[in-house]
Amino acid sequence: MRKLVMEEGTSGFFEELVLFAVVSILFVATLTVAVYYGSMKTAEYEKVEFVNQVYNFVKEVRGYQPILHDSVEGLYDYHKIKSVTYDELKRDLIPSFHFYIAIYDVSDYPMKYNATWGNLENSTVYGYYRVVVTYPVDIWVSDHEIHAAKLEVVGWK
């Protein structure tokens, strides 16, 4: 007995195999691009959030009462600065990241009153995100001597 064969051919599923492969490759490529750009958007959002955290931390440092002179924000008492430690700053300000704080005396006075807290060398080890913020401040030495200074805060995760 003879089988009847349709004129379209007998390959069946194999006719659509090439089309299925092309559609599958396009789907995987589209999915990969979407995941990649989605992860970039998330990373950018995390970085912006971290920058905001560092700026808020700098505001807290500018108003940190134990080192201010007469509770004036940005006017640091040099005699109080010498007594504050890194651990006290970390305990009182409670940052969620590693930090380094430096106050550089940029005045024309011959005696410079610089202060630093933290270890900047660790920022290259842990530095997935690293933000540096600089603000102008003053250092009060006496009623007749106030030095212009620069507050630099480095934060990293």
Image (cartoon, grey):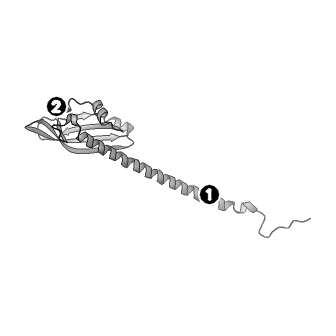
Looking at the picture, which amino acid does disc 1 mark?
Answer: Ser
Residue at numbered disc 2: 79
Crowding at label 2, few (<14), some or many (≥20) Cα neighbours within 10 Å? Answer: some
Q: Work out which quarter of the rendered image holds the N terminus and state it.
A: bottom right
Give how far across and how far down residue 45 sits, in percent: 40, 50
The residue lying toward the viewer, choosing from 155 and 76, is 76
**Toward which corner of the image does residue 70 lie, by quadrant?**
top left
Q: Is residue 28 visible?
A: yes
Q: Work out which quarter of the rendered image holds the C terminus and state it.
A: top left
Q: Compare marks 1 and 2 and give the one earlier in the sequence.
A: 1
Q: Is residue 54 left or right of residue 4?
A: left
| Mark 2 element type | helix
The residue lying toward the viewer, choosing from 2 and 72, is 72
Q: In the rendered structure, find residue 24 and report the number of the disc placed on it.
A: 1
Looking at the picture, which amino acid does disc 2 mark?
Answer: His
Give how far across and how far down residue 91 sits, in percent: 31, 32
Q: Are marks 1 and 2 in contact (CB under 8 Å)?
A: no
| Mark 1 element type | helix
Q: Residue at x 37, y 43 (%)?
A: 129
